[in-house]
Image (spheres, rainbow, N blue to C red):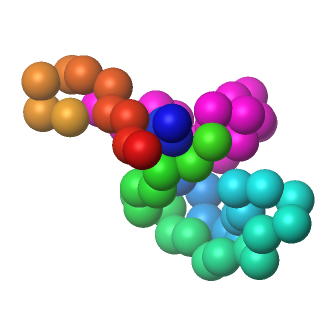
Amino acid sequence: MKVVIEYDEAGLYRDNEWDTPTICSKGQTAAVSPAAAAHLIKTNKAHLWKNERGELQFSN
């Protein structure tokens, strides 16, 4: 399972240590592992993305 986040800061990000970094822009959404989401949220680089009804989004 992956969590959908929205980046608050542009930069190079990767979901796992062995993945190639990808360029992400501010406001871009992405499905990442829960561990990566927790790290990005803790460091204020992203937040959980919610749909129009205010529900968190998950991806397989």
Whether residue 1 sits left or right of residue 11 in the image: it is left
Residue at figure coordinates x 24%, y 22% from the top left = 55
Quarter in which the C terminus is drawn: top left
Residue 43 location (% of width, % of height): 76, 36
Quarter of image, res 38 = top right
Whether residue 33 sits left or right of residue 35 in the image: it is left
Residue at figure coordinates x 71%, y 64% from the top left = 13
Residue 41 location (% of width, % of height): 65, 33
Query: As displayed, is residue 17 above or below residue 24?
Result: above
| Magenta extent | 34-50
Q: Is residue 58 magenta?
A: no
The answer to whether residue 42 of the structure is visible from this angle is: yes
The answer to whether residue 40 of the structure is visible from this angle is: no
Q: Toward the viewer: 48 or 34? A: 34
Q: Toward the viewer: 58 or 51? A: 58
Query: As displayed, is residue 32 above or below residue 56?
Result: below
Residue at figure coordinates x 51%, y 69% from the top left = 25
Residue 48 location (% of width, % of height): 46, 32
Quarter of image, res 14 = bottom right
How many discs appear? 0
Residue 58 location (% of width, % of height): 38, 35
**What is the residue that sits farthest to the right in this orientation?**
17
